[in-house]
Amino acid sequence: MNLFFQSFGSSGRPLIILHGLLGSSDNWHTLGKRFAGEFQVFIPDARNHGRSPHADAFDYGVMADDIRDFMRQHSIPSAHILGHSMGGKTAMTLALHSPSLIDRLVVVDIGPGPSPDSNAAIVRAMLGIDLQRFNSRTSIDQHLSSSIPDATTRQFIMKNLRRDDEGMYSWKVNLASISTNLSEMERGLPGGPTFSGTTLFVRGEKSDYLREMDPGLLQSYFPQCRLVTIPNAGHWVHADAPEELYRTVSTFLKREQARVE
């Protein structure tokens, strides 16, 4: 699969950033440019998201395969990998099964265990709206407000809207495949292999995704991991605290890089 991607910077070690469910490479545009001062940054759209192709198959195994193919297509023998939420589980899957491709691993606000099922209601709301009835983003936002009351979440979801030449709205994401496979995406990763490389888990202080997770579970998959909490941030850490996330990740990657040079 040929994933659409954005890239920033032309020097430094490769850094591949993987976005979350219902997101796209656009969500990481600003931070991608910041990281480009030190790294060669690649931000692909996951399958069924953004401007990448759609497919019925949608799980962490095939998405990890997509990143392997992406690295081969772009002659990237290994890279730092940063993944948020769904992208974090894709990154963990890649690290567990293809550790030689990973220089340093950063996982943002997700762990290897089961994920909260908070996305199911959002996907149902997106499936339940007949977009062809609406002629403005404002009217769509108002309609979704009853099923998705949080305005920040709605604005994030509405970044998936597109409008054709005739003025008709549709979703960029492949909702049919996402809905069919959502329960699989929310399961924990299977046990078995471990990744012995240096790993950083970053969680938002206000997020539920890692709050109750046993640190021993993280270490059972990633024995060389540590966990950092970003104050006053929710699940979308890169939107809530971009500067703090940038400093945390940049410091981690540069420190680990210095050890091997």
Image (cartoon, rainbow, N blue to C red):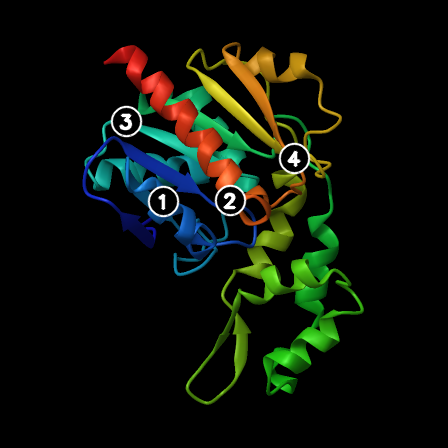
Mark sitting on residue 242: 2
Q: Amino acid at mark 3?
A: Ser
Taking the spot 19% from the left edge, 43% from the top edge, the residue there is 10
Look at the image and tell me whether residue 61 can be seen.
Answer: no
Q: What secondary structure is found at the residue carrying circle 2?
A: helix
Q: Which label number is shown at residue 86?
A: none
Name the residue that disc number 4 marks: 231
Q: Earlier in the sequence, mark 3 or mark 4?
A: 3
Name the residue that disc number 1 marks: 34
Q: Amino acid at mark 1?
A: Arg
Q: Give the structural element (helix, strand or loop) at label 3.
A: loop
Q: Is residue 44 visible?
A: yes
Q: Quadrant of residue 207?
A: top right
Q: Nearer the viewer, mark 2 or mark 3?
A: 2
Gap in Å between the C-alphas at discs 1 and 2?
10 Å
Outermost residue, right side: 146
Q: Reading the chain from its start, which is encountered first: label 1 or label 4?
A: 1
Instruction: Please report the residue visible at 34 percent of the width from the left and 24 percent of the height from the top.
Output: 254
Looking at the image, is mark 1 or mark 3 nearer the viewer? 1
Answer above or below: position of 171 versus 15.
Answer: below
Task: Tell me, for residue 78, which label it has, or none.
Answer: 3
Q: CA distance from mark 3 to mark 4?
A: 31 Å
